[in-house]
Amino acid sequence: MTPARRDDPEPAPPTAPPGPAGPPRAGGPDPAPWQRITVDVPGLEFEARPPGQYAFDFPDSECEGWSTDRLTLRFASVRGAKHRYYRQPRQDAARAAVHEATGSVVFAVADGVSSATESHQGAVEACRAAVERILHLLDRGAQRLDGADVASYAAERLRELARWRLGIAAPQVAEVTRLYATTLVAGVVRVAGEALEAEVFRIGDSGAWLLDRVGGGYHPLFGGKAVPGTPLVGNEVSPLPLVPDRPESAVGRLAEPWVLLVGTDGFGDPLGEGDGRVGELFTRQLGSPPPPLWLGHVLDFTRETFDDDRTLLAVWPRAEGRG
């Protein structure tokens, strides 16, 4: 997201060049203390500073990983260099769950808008609300994911937060946006007999891709950051709590050799079209599901000028199938 607007000048970041940091050995994680992976010109190296004292519930990094009989999920979310230096909490979030009655995997990824003062809370609550709502819709036997319904449910959660924070019964949309604005990408990978079907929708400019882990290549499921016909706030696609009548969505089969990726622009911007060094790095590392901690390590690569928070969620079809 765009940098937070500030009235007071910020201290200058460190200028010392980083020490050498090379990629991991071809065989996998090095048992020695892990050095950050460098892509092209490295960014500046420094010890992360603590976020504000009341941001203790938003750790610098988090990761998750598990498998069902049919699917394997991994996600990681890491604080970017800018937030580490300026004592800001990580404003990205991700959440995932399995719908136990069907074996479907439900997920959400959010990127808090930097100009919102409590966007780290907005991102987490939007993910929680989206996963809760999708699980509820699956319980009711919904045949298709209603993105507008899920997004509206998440937007209402943000309004509830604003009511509590401001102490007023009916906060205006602008007041909710000022506090908790966030993007949201959410969806489900359904188990339908022998087939796996992915449904994804988004609010804002975070992204989703299908990665061909054999032939290489990233196939975006959504357009660029400026979606025709979508209302704008400044130069950005509108985030929650604003909800369009028909959120941008995608539906398709998930089968070998494809991997579903969902990520914030901290991942999508350096990835670009996927034909550069960042794309090569993740094609190699996502050929099979990595350990969750290793995914977080790879996602925390250093590259000059790319200092945003990064979140990446990936879903693989399991080659062994049921059992």
Image (cartoon, grey):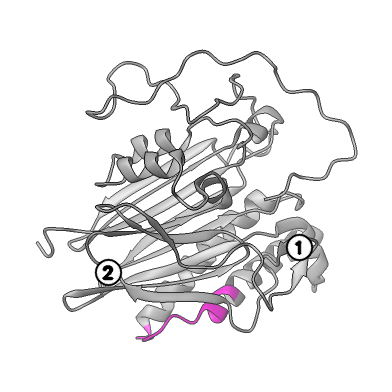
Return the mark for residue 23: none
The kind of secondary structure element at disc 2 is loop
Q: Tag 1: residue type?
A: Thr
Q: x, y percentage for residue 154?
A: 59, 69
Q: Earlier in the sequence, mark 2 or mark 1?
A: 2
- Drawn side of residue 295 relative to residue 186, left or right: left
Q: x, y percentage for residue 116?
A: 75, 53
Q: Is 142 contained in the magenta span? A: yes
**Residue pictured at 16% horizontal, 75% vertical:** 194
Residue picked out by circle 2: 100
**Residue pictured at 81% horizontal, 64% vertical:** 175
Q: x, y percentage for residue 70?
A: 20, 63
Range covered by the magenta-colored residues = 140-151
- Drawn side of residue 295 relative to residue 225, left or right: left
Neighbours of disc 2 within 10 Å: few (<14), some (14-19), many (20+)? few
Neighbours of disc 1 within 10 Å: few (<14), some (14-19), many (20+)? many
Q: x, y percentage for residue 252?
A: 35, 75
Residue picked out by circle 1: 177
Report the mark closest to the observer, 2 or 1.
1
Quarter of the image with the C terminus in it:
bottom left
Cα gap from disc 2 to disc 1, whole angstroms: 34 Å
Q: Tag 2: residue type?
A: Glu
- Drawn side of residue 95 relative to residue 9, left or right: left
Q: Is residue 316 above or below residue 45?
A: below
The kind of secondary structure element at disc 1 is helix
Q: Is residue 246 above or below residue 151?
A: below
Residue 82, located in which quarter of the rendered image? top right
**Residue pictured at 61% horizontal, 76% vertical:** 152
Q: Is 92 contained in the magenta span? A: no
**Residue pictured at 42% horizontal, 77% vertical:** 136
Residue 239, located in which quarter of the rendered image? bottom right
